[in-house]
Image (cartoon, helix red, strand yellow):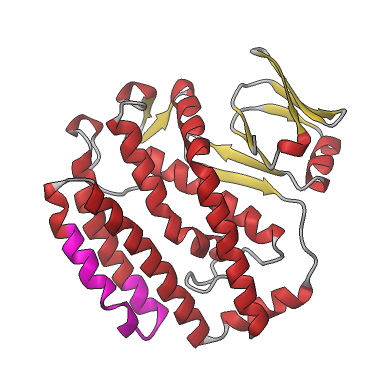
Amino acid sequence: MATVYVDHSGTRIRLQSGSLVLESPAGRRTVPARLLRRLVITAKSELDSGTLNRLAEAGIAVVLLDPHRCRRRALVLGGHQPDAGLRLAQYRAAQDTAFRLEIARALVRAKLQRQLRWLASSSCPSCDAARRRLQGILTRLDGMADPAGLRGLEGSAGRAFFAAYRRLFPDHLGFDGRRRRPPPDPVNACLSLGYALLHSRAVQAAWSAGLDPMIGFYHEPAWGRESLACDLIEPWRPCIERWVAGWFGQRWLEAGHFSRQGDSVRLGKAGRQRFFGAFEKGMPPVERSLRRQIRHLIQRLERL
């Protein structure tokens, strides 16, 4: 059990005798701290500074997540590797145009290849045009001489992919393409929440490995954005897209699990429980691959 979600209002969170103790109106729950990698809090809870310090010392991340807006509000990390030399190498590499371009191509290629494989396995006749478009874009990646050109190609691929992806969902869900802030339909709500959770995992993994999550190679530095984490999750976004399509296709998630507030569609409590459970079931191989990806990046940086 690497992740625990706190989704009941009024939960009191503490560490006692090597276990995380959660006490709420719904009951009492204990989890051995040694099995825990992160605590995701989505409801009003009581957590004192002493417990927060001890969680950080144990390398357990605390994620404050707004499930209604599908956004992370705060992230408390521990377990950092204090290797200044690695960060200096990362900063130098971020100024190396050739290195950045090589990393960017690899990220975009991996993402498009996963999307292509999934579209090919979906048995969707209307996906043929998207497959041809993505295959054509893949052949052009090596000809791009700067990250901006790659971002343009990725944008074209994304439009083609989501034009096909939307056909996999029934009309009553109201999904007509990727939109966010706020998500206007159940599919976009799930995509945004899944991407946000995946991004938090990448921030934690990069920090724990001694990298600076803010400094990426494909995504430019931007105020308040962990650009390296954005880089790292690019190849794994198709996993979220595949899972979401599967959850709705199998009716694990349905329109009744969501509610509308103004322009935004939100997951209800029952829907969140299903979402979080299914997300965690799929994450172990993705997290292992993410850690391998980071180790490979560190090896590249150490050779510079």
Most foreground residue, 279 or 23: 279
Q: Is residue 175 above or below residue 151?
A: above
Most foreground residue, 160 or 10: 160
Q: Is residue 25 left or right of residue 141?
A: right
- Give how far across and how far down residue 193 sits, in percent: 46, 41
Q: Is residue 180 left or right of residue 122?
A: right
* Screen quadrant of the C terminus: bottom right
Where is residue 175, by image quadrant?
top left
State the residue at coordinates (23%, 37%).
Answer: 169
Question: Could you tell me how many numbered marks the image carries?
Answer: 0
State the residue at coordinates (48%, 75%).
Answer: 103
Q: Main secondary structure of the magenta part?
A: helix
Where is residue 23, by image quadrant?
top right
State the residue at coordinates (33%, 82%).
Answer: 142
In the image, is residue 151 part of the stretch drawn in magenta? yes
Residue numbers of the magenta segment: 130-152
Q: Is residue 27 visible?
A: yes
Most foreground residue, 232 or 264: 232
* Screen quadrant of the N terminus: top right
- Give how far across and how far down residue 127 sits, in percent: 17, 52
In the image, is residue 139 part of the stretch drawn in magenta? yes
Q: Is residue 263 visible?
A: no
- Give how far across and how far down residue 14 sits, in percent: 80, 28
State the residue at coordinates (28%, 72%).
Answer: 138
- Give how far across and how far down residue 16 sits, in percent: 85, 27
